[in-house]
Image (tube, rainbow, N blue to C red):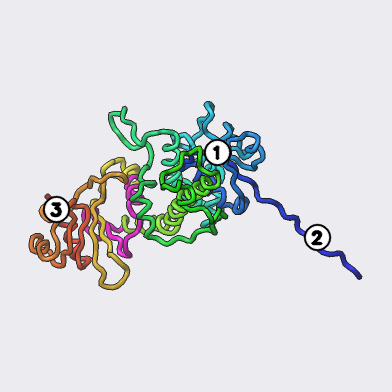
Amino acid sequence: MATGAPAKKLKTNPPLIGTHSGTFHADEALAVYLLRLLPTYSNSPLLRTRDPALLSTCHTVVDVGGEYDSSTHRYDHHQRTFSSCFPSRNTKLSSAGLVYLHFGHAIISARTGLPQDAAETETLFEKLYDDFIEPVDANDNGISAYDVSSPDVKPRFKAHGISLPSLVADLNHPLRLPPPTSVPTDLTDTAILAPSNAPLAREELPQAAEDARFQQASTLMGTAFLRKLALAHGKWLPARATVKAAYDARHGVHESGKIMELSGGGVPWKEHLYALEKEVSGKSGEEGAEKVLFVLYPEGVEPGSKWRVQAVSKGMDSFENRRGLREEWRGMRDQELAGKSGIRGCVFVHAAGFIGGNESREGALEMARRSLVD
């Protein structure tokens, strides 16, 4: 019996993303990249224009149009009536924050394999906003990291996550990137320079060249975000259990409870330590109860690795230590340091006293122990 030919699957065009032309900023560059991390938008073309008629043809519009309505996929924040913030935060959202607010769980799930409704996904959702998205929101909305009018000046948000040192540090870790979106390949830096190498005026820039530069900016912001996510998922999240175990066992390292040991090597421990101490302080009612002053860890997992002793700073953004390594050791190395301290195997103590090294665990522990007293 004859059968009909199988029905052809209709090819649908990917949804068109729109944003404004002209000077571009970090928020819409990131917003576009975040959208393209989702299957729905992975092959989406981008239209950069300020023409309302052209923007009306776009499926999704970010950072332009004077409208915020997720039901029609409009994500602008420039209108006078806009005041939306991330839950439990005070920083007004930019286009990056708006896209992240609505699609962040799906993006994290797509990149990590975690279910969207998993507790771990929610934890990462909050952390990535604090560490990366919020400072982008603040920057675009002209919000200072510090309220200088307050007598007790404290940071409003974590600004260090998008600092150059932080972004460079992230490059120490490999990252699996999604396939790049298609961009013009015949546009280089010289393509938008005058013959004399003098920069062209903005009104003379070819739109295609400007769009190519926007794509560079979008990739810059997007890959930085992906590195933050990969590190948070692959290192920071698992580290919580490691740090908690070390924190609970700290009295076995030293009776004071002020020295903690991470025997498996260095992990992202600071944020977890502060959180654990806050939990303990809340339960005991004592704000300063038994705070850890030094953390020990081997430099590597190989047998015979040298050890580090690191002072705990007063906060995530602080360069001031709760207590540093001994003043008279600072800036010394090797035999000079061993002779001064009377501790075998000394390698170094930083001039600022926040970190030191020793050939053995026992030596590093002794350096910490002696630094507990004046």
Which residue position holds label 3?
326
Q: Residue furthest bottom?
A: 303
Identified by mark 1, the residue type is His
Q: Mark 2: few, some, or many residues within 10 Å (few <14, many ≥20)?
A: few
Q: Mark 1: few, some, or many residues within 10 Å (few <14, many ≥20)?
A: some
For marks 3 and 2, the one nearer the N-term is: 2
Whole-number angstrom distance, CA of label 2 to CA of label 1? 40 Å
Whole-number angstrom distance, CA of label 3 to CA of label 1? 56 Å
Q: Quadrant of the N terminus?
A: bottom right
The answer to whether 345 is drawn above or below residue 236 in the figure is below
Q: Quadrant of residue 300?
A: bottom left
Q: Quadrant of residue 110?
A: bottom right
Camera-side mark, 3 or 2: 2
Which residue position holds label 2?
7
Whole-number angstrom distance, CA of label 3 to CA of label 2? 78 Å
SS at circle 1: loop
Q: Is there a contact, CB below 8 Å, between mark 3 and mark 2?
A: no
* Residue 28 image position (x, y, % from top left): 51, 42
Q: Is residue 116 visible?
A: no
- Residue 342 part of the magenta-drawn span: no
- Residue 252 part of the magenta-drawn span: yes
> Along the line of sight, which residue is nearer the eye, 173 or 275?
173
Which residue corresponds to the image point at 54% horizontal and 37% vertical from the top-left?
Answer: 63
Q: Mark 3: few, some, or many residues within 10 Å (few <14, many ≥20)?
A: some
SS at circle 2: loop
As drawn, is 144 to the left or to the right of 42?
left
Q: Is residue 294 visible?
A: yes
